[in-house]
Image (cartoon, rainbow, N blue to C red):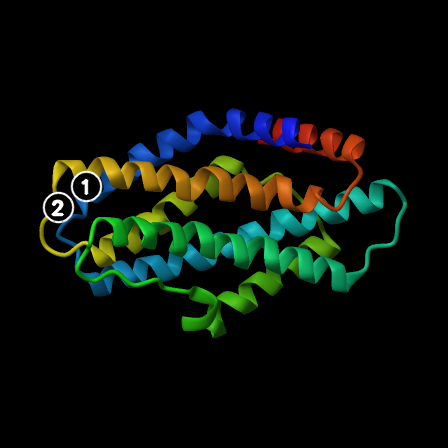
Amino acid sequence: MFKHIAHELEHHAPFTLTGAVSGIIFMLIFKHLSAQTSETIFYVLHPTHVLLSALVTASMYCIYKRANSEKVNILYVLLIGYVGSVGIATLSDSVIPYLGEFLLKMPHRHAHIGFIEKWWLVNPLAIAGIIIAYFAPTTKFPHAGHVLISTWASLFHIIMAKGETISVLAYFTILVFLFLAVWFPCCLSDIIFPLLFVKSKDAHSHSAEHQHNH
């Protein structure tokens, strides 16, 4: 399993780095964006990330179970889909960016926890993604799209906190945190987490199929 996880992380690193660089370009373009507008954009991107993550995470679990002619317990699907999407998306979009903001001592740093602050938006979208996965599981949404949405959500979380000016060194630090915020959490939520609940041989074959679709 650890060898498999390392393979997935290595496979996704190049595009994740590209996404992080695109985030820095966006940050230069939107550097004068107000904190209020940045928050609005964050709360479009973050819930979208949660919806897609819930759909893919729950789908991976359902597809495996049905492929082995096993009954799919809706409660397990809800638990795996919710933790795998809301929990990991919060880590990716809010917690890791906040650590970067804290390290850089940004003036308006604050961890925006979507499923608490906007519980009426984030939680229903997570459940919607899980229900769709239960009845019509699919993993064909491009993983690249998920990576970009997660990167940009993390980015606008940082833009909310940055204040008026930012140094060149800070941009480099933000690049590192954008990469870390997306690289491991996205692989964890889409591929690794749901496959922790399957047999290693089947997990590898389903992951290979998922990777082929993306």
Q: Residue at x 42, y 33 (%)?
A: 16
* Residue type, mark 1 in image: Ala
Residue 25 found in image quarter: top left
- Residue 62 at x, y = what percent? 76, 49
Check if mark 2's residue and mark 1's residue have beta carbons within 8 Å. Answer: yes
Mark 2, residue position = 166
In this image, 160 relative to 62: left or right? left
Q: CA distance from mark 2 to mark 1?
A: 6 Å
Towards the viewer: 196 or 138: 196
Can residue 118 be seen by looking at this rendering?
Answer: no
Towards the viewer: 118 or 108: 108
Can residue 102 be seen by looking at this rendering?
Answer: yes
Residue extending farthest right: 69
Q: How many marks?
A: 2
Mark 1, residue position = 170
- Residue 161 at x, y = what percent? 22, 58
Q: Where does the C terminus fall, quadrant-wise?
A: top right
Q: Where does the N terminus fall, quadrant-wise?
A: top right
Q: Residues within 10 Å of mark 1 (few under 14, many from 20)?
A: some
Q: Residue at x 56, y 54 (%)?
A: 85
- Residue 60 at x, y = what percent? 69, 44
* Residue type, mark 2 in image: Ile
- Residue 69 at x, y = what percent? 90, 45
Q: Secondary structure at mark 1?
A: helix
In this image, 199 relative to 186: left or right? right
Q: Secondary structure at mark 2?
A: loop
Residue 57 in the image: above or below residue 126? above
Residue 30 in the image: above or below residue 24? below
Q: Residue at x 61, y 64 (%)?
A: 127
Residue 164 found in image quarter: bottom left
